[in-house]
């Protein structure tokens, strides 16, 4: 890990020896999660050593220490099995620093998280609340550029979902929300590709296997069976998770279909019951139809979030072009005639 020069800050992978100090500044629930992250670090290191045998699935967790005292942490996880794109969670504060500023600590944590996976990574993604100017400034200083703006939704205020107020899921003959499997993953993959810009698709660098990964247990797809071939009109894809929050993006086909609302409320309720952490739903900021739909089923707008990315793909392509470029004089040398030109024919009568 890179250490900040002339400062008491040290950044390293979280290890078992850190747990004793973490136990005194964190809750029992968070300590159990940190113990799990120690194990995931071990597995992630094995995956990085044997990439041809083990695809990248597990995240890394880095810890910032001020004079050997834990101060903040960051989690970086792969967005695809080839580990070419990584999602960086914005650093979380564990205790208040005594000598350093939080901006300095967060910036160093982000730098180290990107340095950790630099051998294979070509792109990094990070999510920031649109109103948090401090986080945005740190991300932009590290070279991240805005890619997409989302609305973030939280469940209805009656978080317990009064069962009498929720209609049971009605199974329609021609329409069904399905859990993701090898048969319908291609339909969801096409929806995901259509919902992203070409630049974001290049950064994510995903394929079918990335959607059916065992870790992605919350993915869903809405299947229409009105034609001979099944067609997907909407989907739910896990995009981001932290210790106590899971973010799922609601995507749809390019053409608006009113049937998306069928069973969506009960499907979201099922997702919230499958896990003991909070679930947020993301929709594109400019998608008016999805905004109206979530308002209708009782979900509450929480905040706007910005997806920022940093990519090396274009930089590498430009570098290859520059290395192979020739001077204009050398190009023109090949056009010089090797012998005097022949006289041009004339059409004048003899």
Image (cartoon, grey):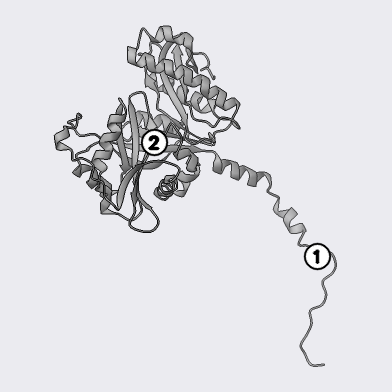
Residue 144 coordinates in the image, percent (x, y):
45, 36
Q: Nearer the viewer, residue 119 or 135?
A: 119
User: x, y (%) of residue 282?
Assistant: 32, 39
C-alpha span from label 1 to label 2: 61 Å
| Residue 272 picture location, percent across and down | 28, 31
Q: Determine whether 133 is above or below 24 in the image.
A: below
Is residue 252 in view from this perspective? no
Image quarter for residue 270? top left
Q: Nearer the viewer, residue 252 or 138?
A: 252
Q: Are dots 1 and 2 in contact, CB under 8 Å?
A: no
Name the outermost residue toward the right. 339
- The label shown at residue 96 is none
Numbered label attached to residue 337: 1
Dot 2 corresponds to which residue?
239
Q: Earlier in the sequence, mark 1 or mark 2?
A: 2
Image quadrant of residue 125? top left
Position of the C terminus by quadrant = bottom right
Count of labels in the image:
2
Residue 120: x and y in percent read 57, 33
Residue 81 visible in rendering: yes
Q: Is residue 331 left or right of residue 147?
A: right
Between marks 1 and 2 in the image, the one whose residue lies nearer the viewer? 2
Question: Helix, strand or loop at disc 1?
Answer: loop
Helix, strand or loop at label 2? It is: strand
């Amino acid at each position: 890990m890179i250490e900040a020069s002339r400062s008491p800050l040290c950044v390293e992978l979280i290890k078992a020896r850190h747990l004793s100090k973490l136990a005194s500044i964190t809750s029992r629930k968070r300590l159990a999660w940190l113990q799990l992250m120690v194990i995931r670090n071990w597995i992630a290191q094995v995956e990085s050593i044997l990439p041809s045998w083990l695809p990248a699935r597990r995240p890394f967790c880095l810890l910032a220490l001020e004079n050997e005292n834990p101060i903040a942490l960051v989690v970086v996880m792969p967005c695809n099995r080839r580990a070419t794109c990584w999602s960086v969670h914005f650093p979380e504060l564990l205790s208040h620093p005594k000598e350093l500023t939080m901006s300095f600590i967060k910036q160093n944590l982000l730098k180290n998280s990107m340095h950790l996976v630099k051998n294979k990574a070509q792109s990094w993604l990070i999510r920031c609340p649109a109103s948090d100017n401090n986080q945005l400034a740190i991300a932009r200083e590290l070279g991240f550029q805005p890619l997409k703006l989302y609305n973030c939704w939280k469940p209805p205020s009656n978080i317990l979902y009064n069962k009498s107020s929720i209609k049971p899921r009605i199974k329609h003959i021609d329409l069904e929300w399905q859990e993701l499997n090898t048969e319908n993953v291609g339909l969801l993959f096409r929806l995901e590709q259509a919902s992203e810009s070409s630049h974001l698709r290049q950064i994510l660098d995903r394929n079918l296997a990335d959607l059916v990964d065992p870790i992605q247990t919350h993915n869903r797809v809405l299947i229409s069976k009105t034609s001979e071939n099944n067609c997907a009109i909407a989907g739910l894809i896990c995009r981001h998770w932290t210790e106590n929050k899971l973010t799922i993006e609601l995507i749809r086909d390019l053409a608006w279909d009113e049937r998306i609302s069928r069973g969506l409320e009960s499907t979201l309720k099922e997702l919230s019951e499958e896990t003991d952490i909070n679930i947020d739903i993301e929709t594109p900021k400019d998608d008016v139809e999805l905004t109206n739909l979530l308002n209708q089923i009782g979900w509450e707008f929480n905040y706007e979030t910005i997806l920022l990315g940093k990519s090396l793909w274009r930089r590498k392509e430009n570098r290859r072009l520059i290395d192979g470029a020739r001077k204009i004089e050398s190009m023109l040398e090949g056009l010089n005639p090797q012998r005097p030109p022949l006289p041009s024919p004339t059409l004048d009568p003899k």
